[in-house]
Structures are given as structure tokens and as C-alpha cells.
Image (tube, rainbow, N blue to C red):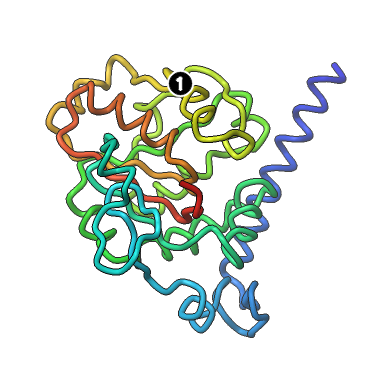
Amino acid sequence: MGGRSSGTGKYIGRMLRTWIHGLAAHLPARCEVCGAWPARPVCERCVARFAQPRPRCRRCALPVPAGVAECGRCLREPPPLDACFAAVDYAYPWSGLVARFKFQGEPGWAGPLAELLRSTPWVEPALERADLLLALPLAPARLAERGFNQALALARRLAPRKADPALLLRLRETAPQAQLDRAARQRNVKDAFALDPLGAPRLRGADVVLVDDVMTSGSSLFSAAAVLRRAGAARVTALVVARTGED
């Protein structure tokens, strides 16, 4: 009985936090970066200051010099993505805001972060062209711990009618990618993703957009994209809020 009561209490607590953050989204607020009031969660001045577009590799969104279309690694080892777009670098203030969204039970950040991503060059056309939006899934234990899938929350804000929460599956729990080097990240997510067998035929010839919050090496997105390719997807694009500078 004690375990069930504890689990119920955690669920109610998560629901209460979600309700509070939903209510707060409709009230006057201070900018979480500079403190300006009244403002959006991140005011227009801070967005203009900290979210300037920059040249990125078209296949992995890694920052590149102006005039460069693809980074060296993508030229040598083309990933299974046709395109990848990131709104910002994983740096101040976005790293802290994404951490609040992801780890501190603040799902209300899905709206502002999705709006930031949607305003990124070439993202709107990718969303309009897409047949399906698939969020990178969490393993059941991680989903239960966190209370929601932050990538799915973003996908539902970006294109609710195209977001499918059940087609792309995670088969097993994996170690946190941030703790691993590039080679270990690739091993960590190998064969970690699969498709719902009943929905897989929908991918034949489809234009698919993968959504996640942060991209580091790209191993998770590449692994998921490879699964979509094998199922017959004609085009796979990735959208992420933030991209680290790690290669």
C-alpha cells in the first residue's frame, strides 16, 4: 500500500505542477532571462540577443564557417538525415531553460521553445511539407520518472495534427548520452529504436520530421532516422531546439 500511495502522490504532484505552469502561461510574467516585465517567458529583446541565426551544417546542424554547407564529418560519413535544423546553441540562457523544461517538471516551456524553433529559418517549410512528426521517444522508466516526454511536447506544439506519439518506439533504456564519448554514444543507441508494426507501412514514401530538444553528437537522432529509412521514408528531417558544439 505504501508504494501505491507514494506513486499516486508523485502523479498528483506532477499534474499539479502542469496545471500551475499552464495557468502561469496566461498571466503577465517577467522575462526569465533579463527580468523585464510584462513580457513573454523570454522577451523579444533577449530572443534577438541570444538566438541570432548562424551558419550550420545542413545535415547535422553543427556550427560551420559562413559559406560552408556541410561539415567534414557529414561529407565523409553522410548521416541518414536529409536536413537538420537547430534554433540555438546549447549555451546561456537556453541550456538553463531547456534543463528546467526537461528535468524540473516545467512542461509549460514547450510553447516558448517550440515558438523559438518554428521561427528558425527553413523550419516552417519543413513542417508544412512533412507527413509525420515523430518525437524521439523515452524509455518507460525515464518517462515515468520525468512525467512527460519533452520531445513529444515540442512536436505537439509544432504540428499537433501531424505528431504521432506511438509510431516510433524505444526498445530499451540507455545511459545518458552526455556522459559518453562519441563512439560510446553510437554503441549506446544501436538498435535502441523500432517502429510499431501496425503503423510502419505509413512510412513508405513519407516525408518525416524527427523532433528532439537537444542534439549533441546526433547518435540518437541518426539511429532513429536509420530505422525510418529502412521502413521506406522518402525524406527525414530533424528539428532540435539546441545544438551543442561537440562533434
Question: Few, some or many C-alpha atoms within 10 Å of disc 1 (few <14, some 14-19, many ≥20)?
Answer: some
Most distant residue in the right direction: 2
To which quarter of the image does residue 218 belong?
Answer: top left
* Front residue of 99 and 30: 99
At 39% from the left and 27% from the top, the residue drawn is 166
Residue 227: x and y, percent? 31, 24
Query: Is 153 drawn above or below residue 33 in the view shown?
Result: above
At 44% from the left and 21% from the top, the residue drawn is 190
Query: Left of 156 or right of it: where is 17?
Result: right
Please state which amino acid type lies under the numbered disc 1: Ala
Residue 243: x and y, percent? 47, 54
Query: Left of 225 or right of it: where is 1?
Result: right
* Front residue of 232 and 247: 247
At 50% from the left and 35% from the top, the residue drawn is 182
Q: In which quarter of the image is the N terminus?
A: top right
Q: Total number of numbered labels?
A: 1
* Front residue of 70 and 194: 70
* Front residue of 18 and 81: 81
Name the residue that disc number 1 marks: 192
Query: Is 128 drawn above or below residue 66 in the view shown?
Result: above
Query: Is 123 drawn above or below residue 216 in the view shown?
Result: below
Question: Could you tell me which secondary element the residue under label 1 belongs to?
Answer: loop
Residue 62: x and y, percent? 39, 54
Query: Is 62 drawn above or below residue 44 in the view shown?
Result: above
